[in-house]
Image (cartoon, helix red, strand yellow):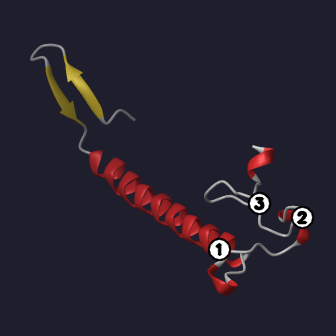
Amino acid sequence: MVFFNLDPKTNRLTSAPQVWVFLAITIPLTFTVFTVWKLWSMWRSKKIDGQMDIEGGGGRLLGGDRLTNDGSPKTLRKGSLIPKEEW
């Protein structure tokens, strides 16, 4: 099914009468994909933030594997739980 075609005689772009099918599928599908991606991104961000302990404003990470030998938190890449040394 061809929705768009270039008329060789007039050199104009023409559309099929069924072009509404193309628009009726692509517009809601694009909106749905964008919405799901945005919700997933917000959920992931909250999940990452939830894994951090913010007592005393220090942003100390939970778990001993994310602390240096002196007990201070390792420097992390923004939006990640991977220590800077492992980049």
Q: Along the line of sight, which residue is nearer the eye, 45 or 11?
A: 45
Percent of width and height locating residue 44: 64, 68
Percent of width and height locating residue 8: 18, 14
Task: Please name the residue that numbered disc 3 is placed on.
Answer: 74
Residue 58 vs residue 27: left or right?
A: right
Q: Amino acid at mark 3?
A: Lys
Where, by quadrant of the figure, is residue 68 drawn? bottom right
Where, by quadrant of the figure, is residue 51 drawn? bottom right
- Marks 1 and 2: which is nearer the front? 2
Which label's residue is closer to the chain start, 1 or 3?
Answer: 1
Q: Residues within 10 Å of mark 3 (few under 14, many from 20)?
A: some
Q: Is residue 40 above or below residue 6?
A: below
Look at 53% across and 65% down and name the residue there.
36
Task: Please name the residue that numbered disc 2 is placed on.
Answer: 65
Query: Which element is circle 3 on?
Result: loop
User: Residue extending furthest front?
Assistant: 70
Label pair 1/3, CB-CB below 8 angstroms: no
Task: Please name the residue that numbered disc 1 is placed on.
Answer: 49
In the rendered image, the quadrant that contains the C terminus is top right
In three-dimensional space, the C-alpha distance between marks 1 and 2, rounded to whole angstroms, equals 17 Å
Residue 5 vs residue 36: left or right?
A: left
Query: Which element is circle 1 on?
Result: helix
User: Residue extending furthest top?
Assistant: 9
In three-dimensional space, the C-alpha distance between marks 1 and 3, rounded to whole angstroms, equals 15 Å
In the rendered image, the quadrant that contains the N terminus is top left
Which label's residue is closer to the chain start, 1 or 2?
Answer: 1
- Marks 1 and 3: which is nearer the front? 3
Q: Along the line of sight, which residue is nearer the eye, 63 or 6?
A: 63
Q: Residues within 10 Å of mark 1 (few under 14, many from 20)?
A: some
User: Residue extending furthest left?
Assistant: 10
